[in-house]
Amino acid sequence: MPNFLANRRRFLTAGAGGMLAPLLPASLLHAQPNHGKTLTVVLPSNPITIDPINQLNHDAMVLGQTVFENLVEYDLDGTLKPQLAKALPTISADKKTYTFDLREDVTFQNGKKMTAEDVKYSFDYLLDAGNKAARRSLFTRITKVTVLEPYKVAFELSEPYGPWLYFLTKYMGIFPAGSRQEHGDDYFKSKPTGVGTGFGVFEAWKPNDYISFTKNKTYWRKGLPHWDRLVVKMIPEDATRVAYLLTNQVDVISAPPPREFNRLKTMPGVTGASRPTLGGALLMYTNTLKPPLDDVNFRKAVACAIDRKTIGEKVYYGLLDPSAVPAPPRGWWFNADADKELAFDLDRAKEFLAKSKYPNGAEIDLSIQAEPYLLDTKDAAIFVQAQLAKIGIKVNLKVYEFSVLIQQAIRGEHQMALQVFMSPGEASYIIQVCLTPGQVLSKSTGYDNAELNSLLVQAFAETEQARLKDLYGKIQMVVARDAPLGVLGYVHASNLWRQGVQDFKVNQGLTMSVGEVRV
Amino acid sequence: MFRLLAGRFLASLGTLFFVGLVLFALTRAGPGSPARIVLGADATSDQIAQFEQANGLDRPFLEQYVVWLCDVLRGDLGKSFVTGRDVAGEIADALPVTLSIVLFAFAIALVVGLGIGISAALRPGRLFASVTRLGVVLGLSIPAFWLGIVLIRFVAVDLRWLPPGGYAPLSAGLTAHLQTIAMPAISLAVYYIAVLARMTAASLQDALRGDYVRTARAMGLSSPRIVAYALLNALPPVVNLAALSFGYMFGWALIIEQVFNIPGLSRALLNAISQRDFLLLQGIVFLFTAIFVIANLGADLVNRVLDPRQRSAA
C-alpha cells in the first residue's frame, strides 16, 4: 500500500507536470529576443488603409511611407529634401510654376522605371475629383502637370502656394502610370504590392493584428533598408504595448503612455526619446459664431484663464510645449509677443470677462474625444474645466468618439471642442484650415478675417524665411488680438525601442521613420 | 419532444429577428456616418451622398432592414464599408480566435468551479468551506482586465513564462496555442469559477438536505452514490447558469482581447463600432446573440436529460 501511495503521488506529480509542461517553457518559444533581421514596430491604432492619398491617421502613415515615395521629402528634422527628384524644384518668378528634375535610377517595385509620366499620372489621379481622394483638397491649387522631358516635370499652380511641397510626404505618393485602373482602389488600400518605389514591399495584412513588408531588393538608395522584413503590429492597449517591448516581442513602439515614459526609457534594455513636433497642436476649437464665444473679450478671458505650463508639466509630463498661438514654441515662425498676449494670467482673464457681454460668466459645452489619438485629452479637459470655473465659467464636458467629434467641428455644431490636431508641421496649415473660409475646419471656429487672409496669401507667395517669419508673426498677432482659436500647446512625438535597435530617430512629424533603422 | 424543440427553435428565431431589428435601429440612430470615416474629414457633401447611395444608406430604415435580413437569410452578411471585405469572411477569421479562448475559459470555469463547489458543499463548516467562501468573494470582485494586466506584469514581463499577448492558432502547434490563450482564458475564467462554485455549493447543499438523501442514507447507500444522486438534482440551476456564463463570456472577451492584444471577434467589434462599420457590427452582434440563444437552448436540452420531471412535462 505505501508503495502504491508513493507511486500514485509520483504519477499525479508527473501528470500535473505533464499538463503544465506546455506552459512552462513558453519563454523559449515566444518571449525570446528577435535575433533575425525582422524589424517589428507597433502602432496604437488599427489602420484603415495603406494608400497615402486616403490616409487619415498620422501613426499609420508609416505604412504608406514604406511603400510609396514623393518628389521631395519633409524629413525627421523638418527639413525639405529631394527624394525622387534630383534636387528641390526651380520656381518661376511668378511663383506659380515648379519644375522638377527626376532621378533616373528609380524603379518601381514591379521593375518598371519611374519617369515623369508616372508623376503626371499620379497627380492627375489625385486631382481628379471623381477619384474621391481624401487628401485631394490640399493640392487643388495645382492646375496642370506637364511632362517636359522623360525625367522632367512641371507643375502649374493657380496662385502662388509654397506649402504644397511640405504636404507631399504625408499625403501623396508616386505610383506607376495606369496602375490605379489596372488594380483598382482596394488594391492600393489593402495590398499595394509592386506599385511603389519605397524601401518596403507589401507582404501581408492580417486584420486587427499586423501588416508586414519585405525588403525592396532593388531599392534605389543602395544598402537600404537594413532589415529583411518589417512587421507593423497593432496594439491599442498602452500596458500591453509596453509589455511587448519589455519582453522583447517588438523593437519599437509609438505613443508610450506619457505618465510612464520617463521611467520606461531608463529601464534596462530599453531606450526612449521624445522631441517636439512642429505640427501636432492641442487645439480647442472655439466656435465664434455661438454665444458666449461670439464675444472677443469672452474668448480672451478663456484663453488667459488656462495655465498651459501646468498642463504641459503635470498632465502630459513634459510631452506638451505650452503655446497660446497656432505656432510651436520651437518653430522658427513662433511669435513670443503674440503668445504673451494670451498667456495665463487670471487677473487679465477676469478683466476680459468683465469687459465682455457675459461679465457674470457663462456655461459652455466642451466636446472631448473618447479614444486617445496622439494624446489623451480627457485629463487636460478636466483641468481646463477647473481653471475656467475660477473665473465663473461653467464647463460641461461632453465625450464623443472621434468620428462624431470631428463631424461636429466640421459642421460647426459645437461650442468648444478639444482635440489634438496633427499637421505636416509647416507654418500655414493650421491657420489656413481652421481660420480661413472654405476649408474643412472653417466652421470649427467660424472665423473670417480679411487681414489674416491677406497676410496668408502673401505668405504663400514668399520663399524667404526672414520675410515669412515676419508675415507669420503678424498673423499670430491677429490671432492673439481676436482669439478665434484656443491653443494649449504642441505635443512631443515619443518612442521607446529596444537597445538592440540602432539608428532609430524620433520624427518631428510623429510618424515612425523605419527605412534606415538597423536591427 | 419534437414539438417542444420546434417551438423553442421558432422562439429563438423570433428572438434573433427582434434583436436584429433593435440592433439595426441602434446602429443607425447613433451620431456619425460611416461615409465620413471612409472618405475622410474633408470629404464634400456630394461625396458623402454618393457613398451613402452606393451603400444603400440613403434608403428608408425599414427598407434597409428588410434588404439586410433577406441577405442574411441567404447567408450573405454584406461587405465591410471600411475594409471592403466580406463580413462573413471577417467573422470567419476572427471567430476561431475568440471561440478558442472562450471555450478554454469555459472549460476551466466548469472544471474548477464545479470541483470547488462540490468540495465546499461536502465539507460545510470546515476550513476549506471558509477559504472557498473567501476565494469566491475575491473571484467575484477582481475585474478581469485588472487580473489580465497583473498576469502580464508578473507572468510575462517578470517571469517570462508566457508571451504578454497575441495569438497563435492551433496550426502553429498545441504548445504555442496554449501559451497564447492561457492567461486570457484564466483572466476570463476567474469570475465564472467563483459564480459556478457558489451556485454549485449552494445547490448541492440544498439537495443534500433533501428527504430522499436521508432515506438513501437510511437504506445504507454508499456516500459517493448518495452524492451522485444529489448532484443530479443539484445540477439543473448550475447548467442554466453555465449556459448564461458561456454567453456572457463573449461579452467579457471584448475587454480581455483588448488587454492581451488578441485579434478576435471583440477587437473586430470595437473597430467596427469606432469606424461606424454597420454591417460588420451587425454581423458580429448578431452572432453573439445567436451564441447566447443557442447556449440557452443547449442548457434546456441538458436539463431535460438530467431531470426526468422536465422530460415528462414535455
Image: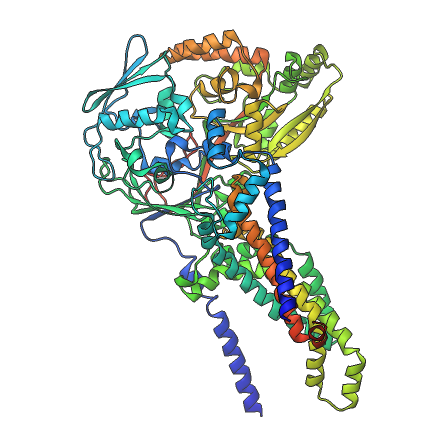
Report the number of discs: 0
Q: Quadrant of residue B14?
A: bottom right
A218 or B94, nearer to the observer? B94
B5 or B52, nearer to the observer? B5
Q: Residue furthest bottom?
A: A1
Q: Residue at x 18, y 24 (%)?
A: A150
- Where residue A131 appears, as percent x and y from the top left, is 38, 29
- Where residue B225 appears, as percent x and y from the top left, is 69, 85
A414 or B108, nearer to the observer? A414
Quarter of the picture containing the N terminus of chain A is bottom right
Evaluate whether residue B258 shows in this view: no
Q: Residue at x 44, y 42 (%)?
A: B83
- Where residue A316 appears, as percent x and y from the top left, is 56, 34
Left/right placement of residue A491 relative to residue A466 reads right
Q: Quadrant of residue A75?
A: top left
Left/right placement of residue B200 relative to residue A502 reads right
Q: Is residue A189 above or below residue A470?
A: below
A272 or B241, nearer to the observer? B241
- Where residue B67 appears, as percent x and y from the top left, is 53, 44
Evaluate whether residue B266 shows in this view: yes
Q: Which color scheme did the rendering employ for the protein? A: rainbow
Q: Is residue A358 above or below residue B142?
A: above
